[in-house]
Amino acid sequence: MRRLGQRYVQYFNRRHTRTGTLWEGRFRSCLVLDEDYFLACQRYIELNPVRAHMVDKPEHYPWSSYQTNALGHDSPLVKPHLAYLRLHHETITRQAVYRQLCEDALPDRLISEIRVASNGNRPLGLAAPSETTLD
């Protein structure tokens, strides 16, 4: 990822006659251990542009999977996750359920939990190693 990022920044800077970095900080990630947390992370990502006041609604942000998952737009880049597919067996109803999920604001506690896990590369979910005991 670092090498790809460096090469892209060089290309972008040459093309737009600029200098400096394009992204703040390093790439962040975390292991997601269960489906409920996966869907929470997906909602977190889909709602980031709304929280950042870049758009009023997630469907107005063209560079996310929201338009595919919630509105049914085709994309060769989006492969539905099993957690998403389990929302409902009918496509139209599944999209409506997903839209409803994204309309409901994420609790501050959950946003904080996702950020702490991704910033520290820690597992996220109910079965996280710190919460389990070894006998």
Image (cartoon, helix red, strand yellow):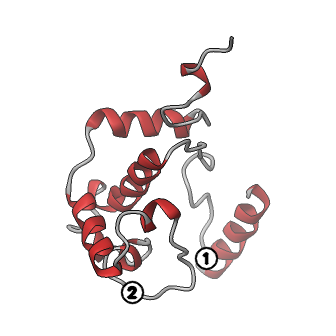
Q: Residue furthest top?
A: 135
User: Percent x, y for residue 15?
Assistant: 64, 81
Q: On the image, which quarter does residue 95 sit in?
A: bottom left
Q: Above or below — where is 87 with respect to 30?
A: below
Q: Which residue is mark 1?
A: 17
Element marked by disc 2:
loop
Residue 73 circle label: 2
Quadrant the C terminus occupies: top right
User: Percent x, y for residue 112?
Assistant: 38, 34
User: Percent x, y for residue 86?
Assistant: 42, 63
> Is 126 displayed left or right of 57 in the figure?
right
Q: Which numbered disc, 1 or 2, marks the residue closer to the eye?
A: 2
> Is 63 displayed left or right of 5 in the figure?
left
- The front one of 95 and 71 is 95
Task: Please give the name of the residue rendered at 41% of the width and 47% of the height, measured from the top-left corner.
Answer: 36
Task: Please give the name of the residue rendered at 58% of the width and 32% of the height, measured from the top-left corner.
Answer: 120
**How many labels sit on residues?**
2
Q: Amino acid at mark 1?
A: Thr
- The front one of 33 and 119 is 33
Task: Please give the name of the residue rendered at 37% of the width and 62% of the height, measured from the top-left corner.
Answer: 46
Q: Above or below — where is 76 with respect to 13?
A: below
Task: Please give the name of the residue rendered at 39% of the width and 87% of the height, measured from the top-left corner.
Answer: 73
Q: Which class describes the residues within 10 Å of circle 1: few (<14), some (14-19), or many (20+)?
A: few
